[in-house]
Image (cartoon, helix red, strand yellow):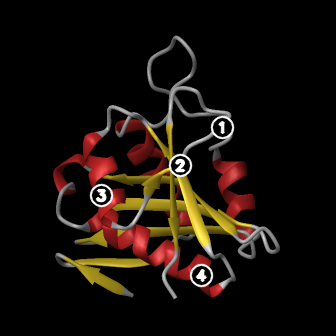
Amino acid sequence: MGHTSGTAIRRATMKDFGPIEALLRDGGLMYAAGEKPCIDSYFDRIYFEDFLRKPEGHLCFVAEAGGEVVGAVLANYTQGYGQAFLDRVVVRADKRRMGIGHALNVRAMQECKNRGAGSVFTYINPGNAASRAMLAGEGFKIAKGPHFLDTATRMMNPIPA
Protein backbone atom coordinates (compact mmCIF):
# COMPACT_ATOMS: atom_id res chain seq x y z
CA MET A 1 0.00 0.00 0.00
CA GLY A 2 1.14 3.51 -0.79
CA HIS A 3 0.63 6.23 1.80
CA THR A 4 -0.06 9.92 1.26
CA SER A 5 -1.13 12.30 4.02
CA GLY A 6 -2.21 9.38 6.23
CA THR A 7 -4.00 7.81 3.30
CA ALA A 8 -3.49 4.22 2.11
CA ILE A 9 -3.83 3.32 -1.57
CA ARG A 10 -5.15 -0.20 -2.19
CA ARG A 11 -6.82 -2.25 -4.90
CA ALA A 12 -10.61 -1.83 -4.88
CA THR A 13 -12.99 -4.63 -3.95
CA MET A 14 -16.72 -5.02 -4.45
CA LYS A 15 -17.38 -3.55 -1.01
CA ASP A 16 -16.03 -0.26 -2.38
CA PHE A 17 -18.81 0.11 -4.97
CA GLY A 18 -21.07 2.31 -2.80
CA PRO A 19 -18.33 4.72 -1.71
CA ILE A 20 -16.92 4.99 -5.27
CA GLU A 21 -20.40 5.56 -6.67
CA ALA A 22 -20.97 8.33 -4.11
CA LEU A 23 -17.60 9.95 -4.88
CA LEU A 24 -18.30 9.97 -8.61
CA ARG A 25 -21.78 11.40 -8.11
CA ASP A 26 -20.64 14.03 -5.59
CA GLY A 27 -17.66 14.92 -7.78
CA GLY A 28 -19.97 15.71 -10.70
CA LEU A 29 -18.53 12.92 -12.85
CA MET A 30 -21.86 11.20 -13.44
CA TYR A 31 -24.50 13.08 -15.40
CA ALA A 32 -27.23 12.12 -17.82
CA ALA A 33 -27.78 14.61 -20.62
CA GLY A 34 -29.93 17.50 -19.41
CA GLU A 35 -30.47 15.99 -15.96
CA LYS A 36 -29.21 16.40 -12.45
CA PRO A 37 -26.14 14.32 -11.54
CA CYS A 38 -27.05 10.66 -11.65
CA ILE A 39 -25.39 7.29 -11.93
CA ASP A 40 -24.10 6.81 -15.44
CA SER A 41 -25.43 3.64 -17.03
CA TYR A 42 -21.96 2.20 -17.56
CA PHE A 43 -20.99 2.59 -13.92
CA ASP A 44 -23.47 0.49 -12.04
CA ARG A 45 -23.03 -2.47 -9.72
CA ILE A 46 -22.97 -4.99 -12.59
CA TYR A 47 -20.39 -2.97 -14.54
CA PHE A 48 -18.20 -2.61 -11.45
CA GLU A 49 -18.42 -6.33 -10.65
CA ASP A 50 -17.39 -7.14 -14.22
CA PHE A 51 -14.64 -4.52 -14.03
CA LEU A 52 -13.16 -6.17 -10.92
CA ARG A 53 -13.57 -9.67 -12.29
CA LYS A 54 -11.37 -8.88 -15.32
CA PRO A 55 -8.21 -7.55 -13.70
CA GLU A 56 -6.12 -8.19 -16.83
CA GLY A 57 -7.54 -5.06 -18.48
CA HIS A 58 -9.15 -3.07 -15.69
CA LEU A 59 -7.62 -1.36 -12.70
CA CYS A 60 -9.33 0.27 -9.77
CA PHE A 61 -7.56 1.61 -6.71
CA VAL A 62 -9.03 3.46 -3.76
CA ALA A 63 -7.54 5.87 -1.27
CA GLU A 64 -8.60 5.14 2.28
CA ALA A 65 -8.25 7.44 5.30
CA GLY A 66 -9.63 6.69 8.72
CA GLY A 67 -11.40 3.60 7.40
CA GLU A 68 -13.27 5.59 4.73
CA VAL A 69 -12.81 5.59 0.97
CA VAL A 70 -11.83 9.17 0.10
CA GLY A 71 -10.67 8.73 -3.49
CA ALA A 72 -10.62 6.35 -6.42
CA VAL A 73 -9.04 5.86 -9.83
CA LEU A 74 -10.33 3.66 -12.65
CA ALA A 75 -8.05 2.80 -15.55
CA ASN A 76 -8.00 0.41 -18.50
CA TYR A 77 -5.17 -1.30 -20.31
CA THR A 78 -5.53 -3.80 -23.13
CA GLN A 79 -2.52 -5.95 -24.01
CA GLY A 80 -1.08 -5.14 -27.40
CA TYR A 81 -2.20 -1.50 -27.63
CA GLY A 82 0.67 -0.03 -25.64
CA GLN A 83 -1.59 2.69 -24.23
CA ALA A 84 -3.60 2.83 -21.04
CA PHE A 85 -6.66 4.99 -20.43
CA LEU A 86 -7.02 6.82 -17.13
CA ASP A 87 -10.81 6.74 -17.01
CA ARG A 88 -11.73 8.58 -13.82
CA VAL A 89 -9.95 10.00 -10.81
CA VAL A 90 -12.03 11.40 -8.00
CA VAL A 91 -11.21 12.61 -4.50
CA ARG A 92 -13.70 13.63 -1.82
CA ALA A 93 -14.01 17.44 -1.69
CA ASP A 94 -12.57 17.81 1.82
CA LYS A 95 -9.52 15.73 0.89
CA ARG A 96 -8.56 17.48 -2.35
CA ARG A 97 -5.21 19.23 -2.87
CA MET A 98 -3.49 16.88 -0.44
CA GLY A 99 -1.75 14.71 -3.05
CA ILE A 100 -4.33 11.91 -2.97
CA GLY A 101 -5.34 12.23 -6.64
CA HIS A 102 -1.66 12.26 -7.60
CA ALA A 103 -0.95 9.16 -5.48
CA LEU A 104 -3.89 7.35 -7.12
CA ASN A 105 -2.66 8.32 -10.61
CA VAL A 106 0.91 7.23 -9.86
CA ARG A 107 -0.30 3.84 -8.58
CA ALA A 108 -2.53 3.28 -11.62
CA MET A 109 0.18 4.37 -14.08
CA GLN A 110 2.78 2.13 -12.42
CA GLU A 111 0.44 -0.85 -12.70
CA CYS A 112 -0.24 -0.01 -16.36
CA LYS A 113 3.51 0.20 -16.98
CA ASN A 114 3.98 -3.18 -15.27
CA ARG A 115 1.44 -4.60 -17.73
CA GLY A 116 3.27 -3.20 -20.75
CA ALA A 117 1.78 0.24 -21.35
CA GLY A 118 4.20 2.79 -22.77
CA SER A 119 1.83 5.72 -22.42
CA VAL A 120 -1.42 6.70 -20.79
CA PHE A 121 -4.09 9.13 -21.91
CA THR A 122 -7.11 10.75 -20.33
CA TYR A 123 -9.75 13.33 -21.04
CA ILE A 124 -10.50 16.25 -18.76
CA ASN A 125 -13.00 19.06 -18.69
CA PRO A 126 -11.14 22.07 -20.14
CA GLY A 127 -12.36 24.22 -17.23
CA ASN A 128 -10.93 21.91 -14.57
CA ALA A 129 -7.76 23.84 -13.78
CA ALA A 130 -6.86 21.71 -10.75
CA SER A 131 -6.92 18.46 -12.75
CA ARG A 132 -5.03 20.05 -15.61
CA ALA A 133 -2.31 21.28 -13.22
CA MET A 134 -2.07 17.90 -11.47
CA LEU A 135 -1.78 16.04 -14.77
CA ALA A 136 0.77 18.53 -16.15
CA GLY A 137 2.83 17.96 -13.01
CA GLU A 138 2.73 14.23 -13.75
CA GLY A 139 4.11 14.77 -17.25
CA PHE A 140 0.85 14.86 -19.22
CA LYS A 141 0.73 17.12 -22.25
CA ILE A 142 -2.25 18.24 -24.29
CA ALA A 143 -2.56 15.92 -27.28
CA LYS A 144 -3.35 17.48 -30.62
CA GLY A 145 -5.58 15.92 -33.21
CA PRO A 146 -9.15 14.73 -33.44
CA HIS A 147 -10.80 12.69 -30.76
CA PHE A 148 -14.33 11.61 -29.99
CA LEU A 149 -14.94 13.97 -27.05
CA ASP A 150 -15.35 17.44 -28.52
CA THR A 151 -16.07 18.93 -25.09
CA ALA A 152 -12.95 17.55 -23.41
CA THR A 153 -9.21 18.04 -23.61
CA ARG A 154 -7.14 14.94 -24.37
CA MET A 155 -3.90 14.66 -22.45
CA MET A 156 -1.11 12.12 -23.02
CA ASN A 157 1.79 10.99 -20.87
CA PRO A 158 4.65 8.69 -21.88
CA ILE A 159 5.24 6.55 -18.80
CA PRO A 160 8.88 7.00 -17.70
CA ALA A 161 11.11 3.93 -17.80
Image quarter hosting the N terminus = bottom left
Q: Which mark is residue 134?
A: 3
Q: Is residue 139 left or right of residue 157?
A: left
Q: Earlier in the sequence, mark 4 or mark 2?
A: 4
The amino acid marked with disc number 2 is Ala
The amino acid marked with disc number 1 is His
Residue at which label 4 appears: 113
The amino acid marked with disc number 3 is Met
Q: Is residue 155 left or right of residue 78?
A: left
Camera-side mark, 2 or 1: 2
CA distance for labels 3 and 1: 22 Å
Q: Dot 2: few (<14), some (14–19), or many (≥20) neighbours within 10 Å?
A: some
Q: Earlier in the sequence, mark 1 or mark 4?
A: 4
Residue at which label 2 appears: 143
> Looking at the image, which is closer to me, 104 or 9?
104
In the current view of this chain or complex, which residue is farthest to the top?
Answer: 34
In the rendered image, residue 131, in percent from the top left (x then y), is placed at 32, 49
Residue at the (48%, 46%) spot, across then down: 21
